[in-house]
Image (spheres, coloured by chain):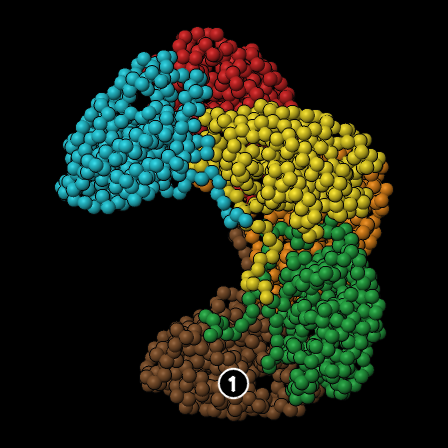
Chain colours: A orange, B red, C yellow, D cyan, E green, F brown
Amino acid sequence: MSSKLTVAAAQLAPVFLDRDATVDKACRTMREAGAAGARLVAFPETFIPGYPYWSLVLDRFSTGRTFDRKLFAEAVEIPSPATKALCAAAKAARLYAVVGLNERDGGTLYNTQLVLGPEGEIIGRRRKLVPTSHERMVWGRGDGRDLQVWPTPLGRLGALICYEHSNALYRYALQSQGEQIHVANWPGGVPWISPIIDAAIRHYAFEAQAFVVNATAVLTDEIIAALGSGGSVDKLAPGGGYSAIVGPLGQFLAGPEPREEKLLLAELDFERIADAKLIVDSAGHYARPDVVRLVLNRHPHAVLEFEGEAT
Amino acid sequence: MSSKLTVAAAQLAPVFLDRDATVDKACRTMREAGAAGARLVAFPETFIPGYPYWSLVLDRFSTGRTFDRKLFAEAVEIPSPATKALCAAAKAARLYAVVGLNERDGGTLYNTQLVLGPEGEIIGRRRKLVPTSHERMVWGRGDGRDLQVWPTPLGRLGALICYEHSNALYRYALQSQGEQIHVANWPGGVPWISPIIDAAIRHYAFEAQAFVVNATAVLTDEIIAALGSGGSVDKLAPGGGYSAIVGPLGQFLAGPEPREEKLLLAELDFERIADAKLIVDSAGHYARPDVVRLVLNRHPHAVLEFEGEAT
Amino acid sequence: MSSKLTVAAAQLAPVFLDRDATVDKACRTMREAGAAGARLVAFPETFIPGYPYWSLVLDRFSTGRTFDRKLFAEAVEIPSPATKALCAAAKAARLYAVVGLNERDGGTLYNTQLVLGPEGEIIGRRRKLVPTSHERMVWGRGDGRDLQVWPTPLGRLGALICYEHSNALYRYALQSQGEQIHVANWPGGVPWISPIIDAAIRHYAFEAQAFVVNATAVLTDEIIAALGSGGSVDKLAPGGGYSAIVGPLGQFLAGPEPREEKLLLAELDFERIADAKLIVDSAGHYARPDVVRLVLNRHPHAVLEFEGEAT
Amino acid sequence: MSSKLTVAAAQLAPVFLDRDATVDKACRTMREAGAAGARLVAFPETFIPGYPYWSLVLDRFSTGRTFDRKLFAEAVEIPSPATKALCAAAKAARLYAVVGLNERDGGTLYNTQLVLGPEGEIIGRRRKLVPTSHERMVWGRGDGRDLQVWPTPLGRLGALICYEHSNALYRYALQSQGEQIHVANWPGGVPWISPIIDAAIRHYAFEAQAFVVNATAVLTDEIIAALGSGGSVDKLAPGGGYSAIVGPLGQFLAGPEPREEKLLLAELDFERIADAKLIVDSAGHYARPDVVRLVLNRHPHAVLEFEGEAT
Amino acid sequence: MSSKLTVAAAQLAPVFLDRDATVDKACRTMREAGAAGARLVAFPETFIPGYPYWSLVLDRFSTGRTFDRKLFAEAVEIPSPATKALCAAAKAARLYAVVGLNERDGGTLYNTQLVLGPEGEIIGRRRKLVPTSHERMVWGRGDGRDLQVWPTPLGRLGALICYEHSNALYRYALQSQGEQIHVANWPGGVPWISPIIDAAIRHYAFEAQAFVVNATAVLTDEIIAALGSGGSVDKLAPGGGYSAIVGPLGQFLAGPEPREEKLLLAELDFERIADAKLIVDSAGHYARPDVVRLVLNRHPHAVLEFEGEAT
Amino acid sequence: MSSKLTVAAAQLAPVFLDRDATVDKACRTMREAGAAGARLVAFPETFIPGYPYWSLVLDRFSTGRTFDRKLFAEAVEIPSPATKALCAAAKAARLYAVVGLNERDGGTLYNTQLVLGPEGEIIGRRRKLVPTSHERMVWGRGDGRDLQVWPTPLGRLGALICYEHSNALYRYALQSQGEQIHVANWPGGVPWISPIIDAAIRHYAFEAQAFVVNATAVLTDEIIAALGSGGSVDKLAPGGGYSAIVGPLGQFLAGPEPREEKLLLAELDFERIADAKLIVDSAGHYARPDVVRLVLNRHPHAVLEFEGEAT
């Protein structure tokens, strides 16, 4: 791992429900981050092509035939031309990127974090394990393969999405794999969760003895207008961001930024992880595996199991 | 997959127990379907050279030496001049075809669906897994290779025969492979099963979130006459068809047609699959692989198992 | 099992979001069914205290603080005075009852079918495995213990809820346990699903070679009024029932009834199961366990596993 | 094993389609055999309550609602009062008995050999693996548990039914388990198969180096009359038996008896097995397991596999 | 559980290293809390007879013979007159109390939370699992019995101490047992940890969907003076408290109070737990036991294991 | 094993908190021992890069940011260039070596004995099971894999560190594995423990019927100076060694040496083990496993347990 490292959190609004234009925006942001010296950039939850706010503020009966279909059409298959464009941009900018997107696989959408490397390769992909509340109308569920830490030359990299941070076992699954840089994603624009994000990301850094790169979107007037005027649309307000970069004792290194589209940058000093671990190493000297241990089932959740080869 | 697509279900009577003449009739129908814009056409169960009605209405003792022998002689080997003629017709018509036929392999007959492609190639072949009732006197049994979905440029294509639709595991084996177009075959002319076909094909479309192209034969006065006058022949009546094309929510797009020989045509709009899957994706977000999963044994059912390679 | 047997499907509207009043209504209906000679009565999905229509027609943002809280408060714990009252009514009426209800366990609600016996005992309890679409905002998920058939003196009894009928594996899990009487529940009042119910219950009877007792609720003007005027409430219309009793070949023995609150009664003749199985026994002579088999994981889904005993 | 031993083959006609009366007849025959010094008695194939001749000589269409239903109703469940009566008779007569019967399990019938011991216990049960021709309309199929040899004080006992004797692997499965006394069953009354029986049982004795106790039924005028007058009933003729007892070199020790109901008796001298094996021990010195070996899968063919315990 | 409930967090300094005087102070505080309507009161970490600040600011070489010996002498055995006095006070005040104390068991001290009930009974006792840093010179380690939630009429009660809150598995062990009121204890007076306490207790409430009653001590000039003048004593400053009561969404209901000795009071409305769980029930609908589960070993950590019973 | 064998105990001071220089010193000492005919050499506890005396004589508050960080940085990862250099030296000197070092694994340090072989290979590694007093601020804890005896051509080799010798079960775990040469390590320089070492190593030899090679460090003026002037530094004095080699009856074969850096050498005569065991074989004829037995859990203490393979 590097001893010092510049990372970025991109607080952005998508070009709402337009996959290709949002991919372009992500690529431009990678270039900007690379030029600023960042070796890692995190994008908001389901940045491409945007978070399904309609499932929160409009009724199910009326949204299925318009917004849900649109999202299904504009979602990202892996691989596809969209992921190829993202990979090429990561390569050009020579950085790692964690890109939130709506993934389409067969007839099911997933809330996915795509992890790209500086050679333009796909490092990994993880799907949110349990969509929250209204999101359950939109996305399927990941499995044990989605709790994985990737070793990189920058350090050991992990990621979770939004309220996944509420579940101690999801978090410890990453922390016990030696995670050093944690990417957190949230949608942005959901009014009541800023104080929750604050506690969640600062406590994560503390309990993991790791850095947290937290990227949220911001809600814009354009997105609100696109949702129309029914239901609770009028309860939405622009802004609602909380992007930030946090150190191992829970201190802010950049942000939090509540409102603007902005590329947050911070230098991570890995000596700070060592400092923290001298007191608490949560998967090391502060653990009690003789008392409590976590079991992680990494078997793929397959509905069909083959015996024998196809002919 | 295509977004829109015209398909056909051919409700026909065979030239009973005459392989070559029935092959000719199938080839003519392919031309007709191609001319009508269809890119896929489905034929009835064991269309070539006809369904063994005698095993239902005549006694075993008396039929073996006449009808069974005749069927054995007029059955189709794969490959053979008969299948070459069918392939050539599919190529000329530039379409996919699923042709029901009596297959002869060694000393055993099978109830087989032969799948042809627009290049004149054989895409696949599947044998009915469990013949029903009186059919067990006529046909052998398929194995796990016969529960297969074929990827095609038109979409993912699968097929089942008649009462195979009664077994949830046979159906889910196809559905879990992402089937989009399902071809169903029934004999036609068996009086009591029309309401069963109705529920089976509409429910199949719903549970698979797929299109169903259902082709049945119709019984004719000529065939009834050919069976002679004994047993229960007098309980048979002409007609007994139920060919239809069904959409992913179980709605009829063409048919059902009870009586006439007819080429049913319908345009499939694949957006309708996406609509259905937003609510239920039976092998995706609506599945519980952690609770129930299907094991499909694809090992060939071979009586002789080799160890080592032949020299 | 009895050779003949009278059963009932109770098509009813709840006293909306009023647990105790709806329990009373259920108890009265048990008395009525018992007096009519029924030995089994099925109630609609989540009859107590009603189906969460608001999650379909109102937006999430505005419903959580009113309707969701109300449902949480009026849901049924097992056991509780509410279930004791139901048990007492079943005992008084000397019948079996399958009662759909919203179950509360800790902080999670479940869509549950409670099965009561004529001694006033709780025979079993099953929770819907995968809530559908908007329902995912309301209910948690069952596990492998919820795919169970109960042996009773009336015959082997199983049950599924609503779109669970779309999943072949859930169905076969019951059918392969020898189910003879299947209770199906649907909410009623959801406009587009009557044709789906029609195909689902008739096909279930056919593929299971069993009787289906299908109970749906009906939507009333009172319930619609209680939902207020926002969102898509105006798209709801009274009625929307499809209660029915179906025989093993898919034929209606009572119903379907689209609109009225009504107690449907039918006499089941178990000889009809034998007739059907002579042709197709889907877990017997028509199965191919050498090719496809179902694996059912009945381990409880527990987040916490203890080693050692509490002290 | 005894060095010498008296055994019996009971050539009998059933009280057609009357389970209880045929059970009585079997019990009487056991008493008679025991009184004659026999320590083992074999009964014909599906003796209780008779072989389904209708499926051979009448048409399917017309038989299902009469003969098939009657057979379903008169078939034997294991255990049941019928098997208890048989066990009591075996105990009273102090002998082993192999009783052919139609077994009913759930919705499927099986062609079963029930093996009883002199303590009135059930030693084993085996189901015919592949019904033959028209029989497939009547019976399901056994699995690997049905190829089993039972060790008894009389010697190692095995059994097969009718055309199962045509399959070398079924036979070798028993022979390779050291079978010494083989019980063969056939229906009797099917005109063309007497020469086949003759070759089958004599060759079996030779290839197994074992004794064969072969019991067939005989067809009676009463049974023919019960079948009515349609189809090919007139092709049936009374008689058609071929019961016999055969020694290890293929020589008849009793019978064959073509026509009469009769209890055949013979004394088996086990020295004759040793004589034969000096030359050919087909699962011993004459085998080449390094070159060919038989794999027998004895896992039950279960359509449903559980993980975890029921609660 | 009660729907509404008043609870208290007692921010206090001990009568340093004087067990009996500190017990008196605890008893007086219970009376005060009871009089204020509180039904539960939480005391600081190792309140009786105080936190071993010397192990942090003085060297090991010089403290063992003075401070450590003093603490050993003034620690609390369970049961003992000290615990009896505490129990009597809880009974007089009719409340539950969680009292932090230095427990002595044989030759080892433990950092213990003693839980008392309003009948004057000891509800439970838990020992810190992993002392932190310098504390490891003072206290032993608990075992799996120390991760326990106690059912009480007030709700399900659990507790953790200080940096135990950094370990996800310790926390989830309580949360998965349905904890509703969580008592957190910290020493107070350790300058750098106030921001950590802030994130830890607010995030705990959020991830547990529970109330957190957080009691810290405050450091006083008297205690600092008692430590003498060596080492880093001069780096200590009076105050350093952060007692607070937090609601299920992470909001403060009372406090945080940084400096004063004070009895914080708040009314808990259990409807707020229901509200939170409608969105996230971390051991219910938001868990994935099929993917990650926690194993808790509750076997006592005994150095000696008996086989057989003593006689 | 050899009947006679020369071994060495290296009493040395580290180049304090300088990993690479101390590694060099260890390598030079291996060469020296090899040249003197030794086939095994033991180094002091945490020789590389020194024992954390500051945790004993300075206060926690002031040491964390200086000494602890320095130790973290200068600790040894396994493998790493430091261990490669040590391996190469063992190979060059053709001897076995047991090297005490501070091991870093993730965020936790361990007090480790690294065992090297004459082919330059790592034979084993063991971590101290329970750090003592002030050491608990520095090191984590080993598990059951750390109680292991290694078979070597020299004899069966085991090792323990410092106060681990106080625990009878740790010792018996090695002795019951047939240990013949025991390496003991202590820090040296801690004034009060020389008499403890004396009793511990002589008794070990007796109870194990084995040789003990005991290596301690010596404290130097340079190290004392490096600790500065605060706390109890002035209570430290140079020297404090007690290296020695002991025979199976507790007799000194070399040393003890209290003060100088020195390489102690002795010839071991394995006949002396046999002599001792004639009287007491503590894991053999003198044991009563029917009455008392030791259970050693060698499962790794893993906080995370995987099911399934990573993909």
E37 left or right of B135? right
Quarter residue D289 falls in: top left
> Residue at the spot x=74%, y=43% of the render?
C19
> Residue at the spot x=60%, y=24% of the render?
C253
Q: Tell me if residue F289 comes above or below residue C162 in the rendering.
A: below
Residue D275 visible in the snapshot:
yes
Residue C280 visible in the snapshot:
no
Decide: few, some or many residues near mark 1? Use Cα within 10 Å; few <14, some 14-19, many ≥20. many
F221 left or right of B229? right
Between C186 and F140, the residue placed more toward the observer is: C186
Between F23 and B1, the residue placed more toward the observer is: B1
F288 left or right of E4? left
Q: Tell me if residue C269 comes above or below residue A292 in the rendering.
A: above
B30 left or right of A138? left
Between A96 and F154, the residue placed more toward the observer is: F154
Between F150 and D311, the residue placed more toward the observer is: D311
Q: Return the residue at label 1.
A: F216
> Residue at the spot x=61%, y=37% of the render?
C95
- Label 1 sits on a secondary structure element that is strand
> Residue at the spot x=41%, y=21% of the render?
D67
Quarter residue A167 falls in: bottom right
Residue A300 place in picture, x, y as percent: 55, 47
Residue E79 place in picture, x, y as percent: 65, 77
Q: Tell me if residue F299 comes above or below residue F61 in the rendering.
A: above
Q: Tell me if residue A212 comes above or below residue B195 in the rendering.
A: below
The count of marks equals 1
Residue E111 place in picture, x, y as percent: 67, 74
Under mark 1, the amino acid is: Thr
Q: Chain of mark 1?
A: F
